[in-house]
Image (cartoon, coloured by chain):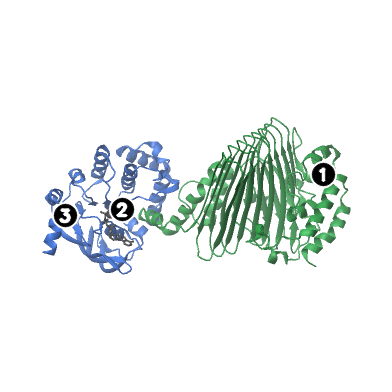
Amino acid sequence: MELKDKLVSSFMAFENQIDVDTSVHDIRSEAIKIFEEKGFPTKKEEAWKYTSLNTLLKNDFSVFPKEEVALDFKDIKKYFIHDIDSYKIVFIDGVYSSHLSETTHEGMDICLMSAALHKPKYRPVIDNYFNKVAKTDDSLTSLNTAFSKEGAYIHIPKNKAVDKPVQIIHFATGNEAAIMLQPRNLIIVDENSHIQIIERHQSLTENPVLTNSVTEIFADKRAVVDYYKIQNDVQSASLIDNTYISQQRDSNASVHTFSFGGNITRNNLNFYHKGEHIDSTLKGVTIVGDKQHVDHYSLVHHAQPNCESHQDYKGIYADRSTGVFNGKIVVDKIAQKTNAFQQNNNILINDKATINTKPQLEIFADDVKCSHGCTIGQLDEEALFYLRTRGIPEKEGRALLMYAFANNVLESVKIPEVKRRINKLIATKLGVNLGFDL
Amino acid sequence: MLTIKNLHAGVEDKEILKGIDLEVKPGEVHAIMGPNGSGKSTLSSVIAGKEEYEVSEGEIYLEGEDIGELAAEERAHKGLFLSFQYPVEIPGVSVTNFIKTAINESRKAKGMEDMPANEMLKKIREKAELLDIDRKFLSRSLNEGFSGGEKKRNEIFQLAMLEPKLAILDETDSGLDIDALRIVANGVNKLRSKDNAVVVITHYQRLLEYIVPDFVHVLHDGKIVKSGTKELALELEAKGYDWVKQEVTA
Ligand SMILES: Nc1ncnc2c1ncn2[C@@H]1O[C@H](COP(=O)(O)OP(=O)(O)OP(=O)(O)O)[C@@H](O)[C@H]1O
Ligand SMILES: [Mg+2]
């Protein structure tokens, strides 16, 4: 049976196994209809022109985990940013792992989506926020919505700076021959509150994994949300990340995406402005090789005056890897005095690697500052020669140049341990020790 | 120290260096002058090991060892240094991190441990002082947005840090104001000893008043057409290159 049919036909069974709140039930039923109608996206769609899910979807993914697997912290410690104190929401094959997690209900909720969806006390919040910023006509988002059951639920009340970062980590154990995971996160940051979140998906075996994740983030007035996505999964794991961010006035939201691994990685990242003086930051470093494929598909919708967005993606593609950058900026007619910057720079290490980069600017206001630039190049041989005349060997020189190329994206990373970890991952990825402290 | 024998080099079908002979002994300063496009920078790049140029004939020896087949970094490890006419900008790497990497890579190549951090810091401070370089400058990205003069001064800072046996300074004086020229020349002179040597490429006599050459060579159309002592530089300054060219064609 094709994966689509399998999913559609298992929807009833899925709905029956959970006790259903009516409003969520309606949303789910509507969502499965959309998915049934649209199916998985194909290369015929403009938005998926360069990313094919065909081969991936031939796997016989099981769509519900069968049994729970326990993991020992010492075996997976390295996937955490473990040198900082943090809240942790950990899932194993889609199932919440309480012994690896550290959640809280003290003065804020950093807990589980399953609880939020089912406990009556969360009903008003769910009614207000669940599936309210996610794109309801998008097939993969709808698929996730239809099966939404588990994930992170975070609600920070007003005037609170969360004392430590939150790590959301999904492990796949290979307990199933092939597994499809559909985490659903809801993050609500009320007025003048601050939060930092680190998200990671990690498969522990070579068994195929397909994750179709949806995260909805609501940043209220003056809220500050910093989100770090560490994508360094094994070759057999693919990720479709759908992140939707709704920002109220004077809020500041940033998403840094570090894509170093995985089979197919698609990041659908969407920012919607609901007030003035909003700041949005989208940054990414992609370093891939082999036959890896990374697709960044972003939207910043400037719908109000006096807002800013800063987008900067760097990509280094080796071997036969492929990349896509599609950055759409929409500036509505009323969104005067918008400052929107977009930059996408790429280095191809090998002539078999490819990148398709396409800025899409739709600007309807006249008093705006928008700039965009994209470059595709090789490493600067002149610079490499310069380094070599100073005694830096070719391999290290190349690495240093690539490191330097990606480096400025890290400047805006606010958690030093995350910065250090990413630096390390970059160095590992480039296969060198850079000779100075990272 | 440096011996070049009948060096021919060029790109694809174009020969740029057409048979160069040069002998630089320890403790000496040689100046190379010559009109634009005569091959001065090409010569320094070929000595430094730029692969873009093909050496069709001739040899280059550093301290008696044929370095013609060595990679640029290996030549650097053997004590060769080139101060670039046009230093390259490398955004994202600070001057300090760059120099640390360079020093430690050279040490690694010699089987030495990394330089201890405090020793490194001390050395950086000392050399920065010697060249009157502001500390803030050292944390900036390498050459990025540096003024012409700052770039040149930074080249000499690297020279001071790396302490090479043979330094080739390709138009280090161009872009420097009078004070900077004095500071930089002074820095170079402080680093000189009976065991190392300097080749300065310049268009102007001015630099040679500070870094006094033992020999002056005139490069023209890929060949050294005239060699002499420091008086030759004065003569060139007064008469231009035409008389040298005429002598050659005559
Ligand atoms: N990579 C190259 N490809 C083609 N031509 C080259 C290349 N490098 C140098 N040349 C040519 O070789 C000649 C010598 O150049 P070079 O830069 O060595 O001159 P120079 O003596 O340093 O001049 P200047 O005084 O202007 O610095 C010039 O005609 C130059 O255009
Ligand atoms: Mg030159």
* Amino acid type at image mark 3: Tyr
Most extreme residue toward the top, as rendered? A159
Per the model, the C-alpha gap separating discs 3 and 1 is 87 Å
Q: Is residue B195 above or below residue A293?
A: above
Which x, y percent locates residue B153?
A: 32, 43
Q: Name the residue under label 2.
A: B82
Q: Which chain carries label 3?
A: B
Q: In which quarter of the image is ligand 2?
A: bottom left
Which x, y percent locates residue A26?
A: 85, 48
Per the model, the C-alpha gap separating discs 3 and 2 is 25 Å
Question: Is residue A92 left or right of B170 when viewed as pictured?
Answer: right
Q: Does the residue labelled 1 lie within 8 Å of ligand 1?
A: no
Q: Mark 3 points at which residue?
A: B241
- Front residue of B85/A166: it is B85
Question: Is residue B82 left or right of A141 when viewed as pictured?
Answer: left
Q: Chain A is drawn in which colour?
A: green
Residue A172 in view (yes/no): no
Q: Mark 1 points at which residue?
A: A117
First in sequence: mark 3 or mark 2? 2
* Amino acid type at image mark 1: Leu
Which x, y percent locates residue B48?
A: 31, 58
Which x, y percent locates residue A73?
A: 69, 49
